[in-house]
């Protein structure tokens, strides 16, 4: 049986952040992930985790200045010191809160800087691997689609594999977001197969609307069945944007074993 993690950056977004942990537990999630927890102290989040009895399993490195169009700094030439400070912050949260996965966000780069960006990304990831050490934390890199995220450096699974080969550490894996991969490349099952040993986490959402994974282009029962058949033991992140409220849209998850506690009849 698969295990789902609620991405509380998108789910329960009508609630204050610290209340989303208990909301996730109420509909049956035992694990949650988020994007950027840094507006709240480690102590505040630890308290929310204790009250809700869920585990925080994944966070992102800080995005930089989103108002200026930044979405991560790891592949941005000239921002190495800013990336290092942000990564140190993410690592401190992860270690204190028992988080086992950090998504290292590559960032946006102009086309004429892509060669330098590759070298910067690899260098920063190598340094991040050294900092992680033997903590058991996995670093993730995620290809994003260029429709939603134009200018993002990492845009394909194959490009992510090139980065992993250059870094040369099994501490760095691919975050395979089915929504992004389908929009950008397609051929989901084959890309899972071809890169199976490189995948550290999977996220799901409907295509093309990024709503609940119960309709659209992707046959998710088939995809999930394939993951079960392969013996996938990791989490699957529910990173979608509810079409109405999170609670009224949870029926999709019942077939995968998520509890119905708190769901409307």
Image (tube, rainbow, N blue to C red):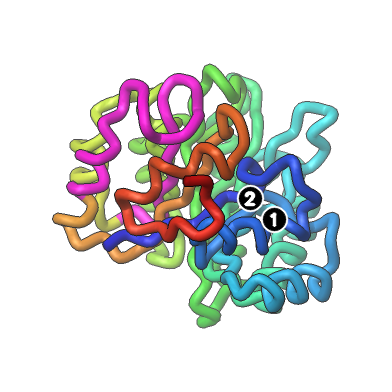
Is 201 magenta? The answer is yes
Residues 182 and 191: in front is: 182
Count of numbered circles in the view: 2
Q: Where is residue 111 drawn, in percent x and y? A: 59, 20
Q: Residue at x 47, y 30 (%)?
A: 155
> Viewed as shown, does residue 6 lie left or right of 169?
right
Q: Quadrant of the rendered structure where residue 158 is?
A: top left
Q: Where is residue 225 drawn, in percent x and y? A: 19, 48
Q: Residue furthest bottom?
A: 134
Q: Residue at x 52, y 71 (%)?
A: 137
Residues 136 and 160: in front is: 136
State whether residue 212 appears in this view: yes
Question: Which of the labelled discs sits on residue 20, or is there none?
Answer: 1
Of the residues under marks 1 and 2, which one precedes in the sequence? 2
Q: Quadrant of the rendered structure where residue 108 is?
A: top right
Q: Residue at x 47, y 46 (%)?
A: 265
Range shown magenta = 198-226
Q: Residue at x 80, y 57 (%)?
A: 38
Q: Label 2 belongs to which residue?
A: 8
Above or below, comparing residue 85 to residue 110 in the picture: below
Quadrant location, the N terminus: bottom left
Mark 2 crowd level (few <14, some 14–19, many ≥20, 10 Å Cα)? many
Give the CA separation, mark 1 to mark 2: 6 Å
Marks 1 & 2, CB-CB < 8 Å contact: yes
Q: Where is residue 215 drawn, in percent x and y? A: 36, 26
């Amino acid at each position: 049986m698969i295990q789902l993690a609620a991405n509380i950056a998108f789910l329960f977004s009508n609630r204050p952040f610290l209340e989303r942990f208990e909301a996730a537990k109420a509909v049956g999630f035992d694990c949650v992930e988020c994007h950027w927890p840094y507006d709240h102290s480690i102590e505040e989040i630890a308290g929310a985790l204790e009250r809700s009895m869920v585990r925080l399993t994944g966070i992102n490195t800080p995005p930089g200045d989103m108002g200026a169009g930044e979405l991560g700094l790891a592949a941005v030439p000239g921002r190495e010191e800013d990336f290092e400070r942000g990564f140190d912050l993410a690592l401190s949260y992860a270690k204190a809160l028992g988080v086992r996965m950090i998504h290292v966000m590559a960032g946006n780069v102009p086309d004429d800087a892509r060669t330098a960006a590759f070298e910067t990304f690899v260098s920063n990831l190598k340094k991040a691997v050294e900092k992680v050490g033997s903590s058991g934390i996995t670093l993730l890199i995620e290809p994003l689609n260029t429709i939603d995220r134009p200018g993002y450096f990492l845009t394909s699974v194959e490009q992510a594999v090139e980065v992993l080969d250059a870094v040369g550490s099994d501490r760095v894996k691919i975050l395979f977001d089915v929504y992004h991969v389908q929009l950008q490349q397609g051929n989901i099952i084959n890309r899972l197969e071809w890169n199976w040993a490189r995948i550290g986490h999977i996220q799901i959402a409907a295509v093309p609307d990024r709503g609940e994974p119960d309709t659209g282009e992707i046959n998710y029962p088939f995809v999930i069945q394939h993951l079960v058949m392969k013996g996938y033991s990791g989490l699957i992140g529910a990173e979608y944007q509810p079409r109405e409220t999170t609670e009224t849209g949870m029926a999709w998850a019942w077939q995968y074993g998520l509890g119905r506690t708190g769901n409307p009849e």
